[in-house]
Image (cartoon, rainbow, N blue to C red):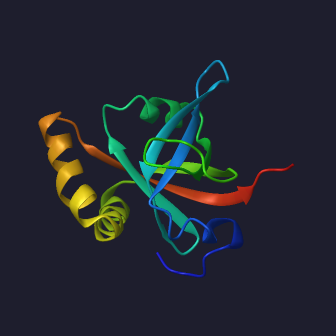
Amino acid sequence: MSGQVPPPLQRFVAEKVVLLQTRKRDGSWVDTPVNIAVQGQRAFFRTPGLASKNKRLRNFPEVQFCPSTWRGKPTGPPVRAAARRLSGEESAAAGRLISRKYPLLQRILVPLTHRLMRTETVHYQLTDVRELPD
């Protein structure tokens, strides 16, 4: 998980929250604020296994995301990317990266919440990040 951060992803390195947009079967987009961590040419986020976005990502892995407030209000232009569910060591490495960036929230509170919900924690990688055409 190393390498130089590509230009479309550079502005997300310091971002705490992005508005992730996933596509439904009818073609409409569903907005969800998520924490993001960037390393090299990829960005990572986590979600509970019971979240509906997992099904949407399985059906349509292309996503859009943009910087946002904690409440999900966009604060910048979106980019497009491909999402891939991680497993094994890749998932563990993504989890460590996210936990380092958000020590209280993602290292303690989110895993506790997922345990209380009795669901697994799922990690995704965002790759092939590119600007949207005007």
Q: Is residue 61 left or right of residue 32?
A: right
Q: Is residue 105 above or below residue 27?
A: below
- Rendering coords of residue 23 (x, y %): 60, 31
* Residue depicted at 54% across the width and 50% down the height: 68
Residue 119 image position (x, y, % from top left): 21, 36
Residue drawn at (61%, 51%), measured in percent from left and top?
75
Horizontal relation, residue 88 to residue 108: left or right:
right
Quadrant of residue 64 in the image? Answer: top right
Residue at (46%, 75%) from the top-left corner? Answer: 1
Between residue 7 and residue 69, name the one nearer to us. 69
Residue 78 drawn above or below residue 23: below
Q: How many marks?
A: 0
Kindly identify the residue that appears in the image at 17 percent across and 57 percent down.
108
Q: Position of residue 120 (x, y in %)?
A: 24, 42
Q: Position of residue 132 (x, y in %)?
A: 78, 51
Which of the 4 image quarters holds residue 49?
A: top left
Furthest residue in direction top, as rendered: 26
